[in-house]
């Protein structure tokens, strides 16, 4: 289940580096084309590429800062730095990319300017599309390796469920960049055919709205990570299965998980144990259960298990931690089935 438990690792770094290299080259090319043509859509695309290049630099900075060792002030480490810089990326994408493009688009619609050398703009846009396609292809390949063969069949679902912000950010930025290039190309072509430079402004406005939409999605997802997300259902199921896969734990009463970083998971669980155990046996059993969890879910670096005696009448089914444990427990499901058969009879 490595594909489910992993979070991107070096794969995410490769996609960010590929996107950074592509966007620097694209930004330079677009700015040259803007100087030649004076196209507002080309200027919007140039600023977009500059913002994307800065965003990739921020993602790389976040990865570096997240590798710092724990301190007394930050005893759970700095893994959340990657979430923070992912959120900053969304802010930059909105303020620098979207806001500027919308402003430039409205300005060119109200005060249209003549577009010169449209052929240059078209050639540059086609070259930029090829470079963006390379970056997007790299991000797609990285996301497939991160997803593994199992749960995330669509990229939208991948973006929603991924715990590492880098690959989703690159996927969103590259998809927006490719779509924006289509908008810019259409704007240049329509301006050339109709002779109306206002189409150029419309293209810039469309690019700005697109970037604002993408920035909103990215901000929403990274905000959720910053607030604190639990592990996926598959990972929680693996944790409960590992805890219950031995005589030391009768069942998991409740389970709480928290991503301290993309590759660091905090696990807190209350486990039911036998009443006749000695303290030494109890401690040994907890240590054994923790080793099973770490073997099944390597990113579960921090595990806190609280032993208790289970009483079904005390279970508060409104508690999300209890629901998570019951949803993930095969033993609990088996007991529920047995109770149902006893109530209704074998027929």
Image (tube, rainbow, N blue to C red):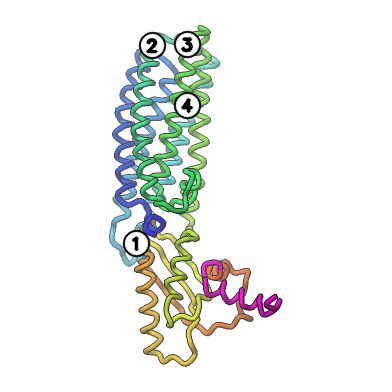
- Mark 4 or mark 3: whose residue is earlier in sequence: 4
Local SS, label 4: helix
Q: Is residue 74 above or below residue 244?
A: above
Q: Is residue 230 above or below residue 280?
A: above
The structure residue drawn at horizontal position 36% and vertical position 62%, both measured from the top left corner, is 299
Residue at position x 28%, y 61% in the image: 69
Q: Is residue 57 left or right of residue 322?
A: left
User: Label 4: which residue?
Assistant: 101
Judging by the rendered image, the residue that carries numbered circle 1 is: 77
Give the mark nearest the N terminus, 2 or 4: 4
Give the secondary structure at mark 2.
Answer: helix
Q: CA distance from mark 1 to mark 4?
A: 38 Å
Residue denoted by label 2: 119
Pick the front one: 186 or 258:
186
* Separation (CA) of disc 4 from disc 3: 16 Å
- Quadrant of the image for the N terminus? bottom left
Residue drawn where x is 32% and y is 67% of the image: 72
What is the residue that sits farthest to the top in this orientation? 195
Label 1 close to label 4 by CB (< 8 Å): no
- Is 333 part of what is drawn in magenta? yes
Distance CA(mark 3)–CA(mark 1): 53 Å
Gap in angstroms between the C-alphas marked 2 and 3: 17 Å
Q: Which residue lies under the disc numbered 3? A: 113
Circle 2 crowding by C-alpha within 10 Å: few under 14, some 14–19, many from 20: some
Q: Where does the image place residue 295, in percent across and percent down from the top left?
A: 34, 68
In the image, which residues are magenta? Answer: 327-347
Work out whether 327 lies above or below 136: below
Where disc 3 sits, the SS reads loop
**Label 2 to label 1: alpha-carbon separation:** 53 Å
Taking the magenta stretch, the answer to whether it contains residue 66 is no
Q: Dot 3: few (<14), some (14–19), or many (≥20) neighbours within 10 Å?
A: some
């Amino acid at each position: 289940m490595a594909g489910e438990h992993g979070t991107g690792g070096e794969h995410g770094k490769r996609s960010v580096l590929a996107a950074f290299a592509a966007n620097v080259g694209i930004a330079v090319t677009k700015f040259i084309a803007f100087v030649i043509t004076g196209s507002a859509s080309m200027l919007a695309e140039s600023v977009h590429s500059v913002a994307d290049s800065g965003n990739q630099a921020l993602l790389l900075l976040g990865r570096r800062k997240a590798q710092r060792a724990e301190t007394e002030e930050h005893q759970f480490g700095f893994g959340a730095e990657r979430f923070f810089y992912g959120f900053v990326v969304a802010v930059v994408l909105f303020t620098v990319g979207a806001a500027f493009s919308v402003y430039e688009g409205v300005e060119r619609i109200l005060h249209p300017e003549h577009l010169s050398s449209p052929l240059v703009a078209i050639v540059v846009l086609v070259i930029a599309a090829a470079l963006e396609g390379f970056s997007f292809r790299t991000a797609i390949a990285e996301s497939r390796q991160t997803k593994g063969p199992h749960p995330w069949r669509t990229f939208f679902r991948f973006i929603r469920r991924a715990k590492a912000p880098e690959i989703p950010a690159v996927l969103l930025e590259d998809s927006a960049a490719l779509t924006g290039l289509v908008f810019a190309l259409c704007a240049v072509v329509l301006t050339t055919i109709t002779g109306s430079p206002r189409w150029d402004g419309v293209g810039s406005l469309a690019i700005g709205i697109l970037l604002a939409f993408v920035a909103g999605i990215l901000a929403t997802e990274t905000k959720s990570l910053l607030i604190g997300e639990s592990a996926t259902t598959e990972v929680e199921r693996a944790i409960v299965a590992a805890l219950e896969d031995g005589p030391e734990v009768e069942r998991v009463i409740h389970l709480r998980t928290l991503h301290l970083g993309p590759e660091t998971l905090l696990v807190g669980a209350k486990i039911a144990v036998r009443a006749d155990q000695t303290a030494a046996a109890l401690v040994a059993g907890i240590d054994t259960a923790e080793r099973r969890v770490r073997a099944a879910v390597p990113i579960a670096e921090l595990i806190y298990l609280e032993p208790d005696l289970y009483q079904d009448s005390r279970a508060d089914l409104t508690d999300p931690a209890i629901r998570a444990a019951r949803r993930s427990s095969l033993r609990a499901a088996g007991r529920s089935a047995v109770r149902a058969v006893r109530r209704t009879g074998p027929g």
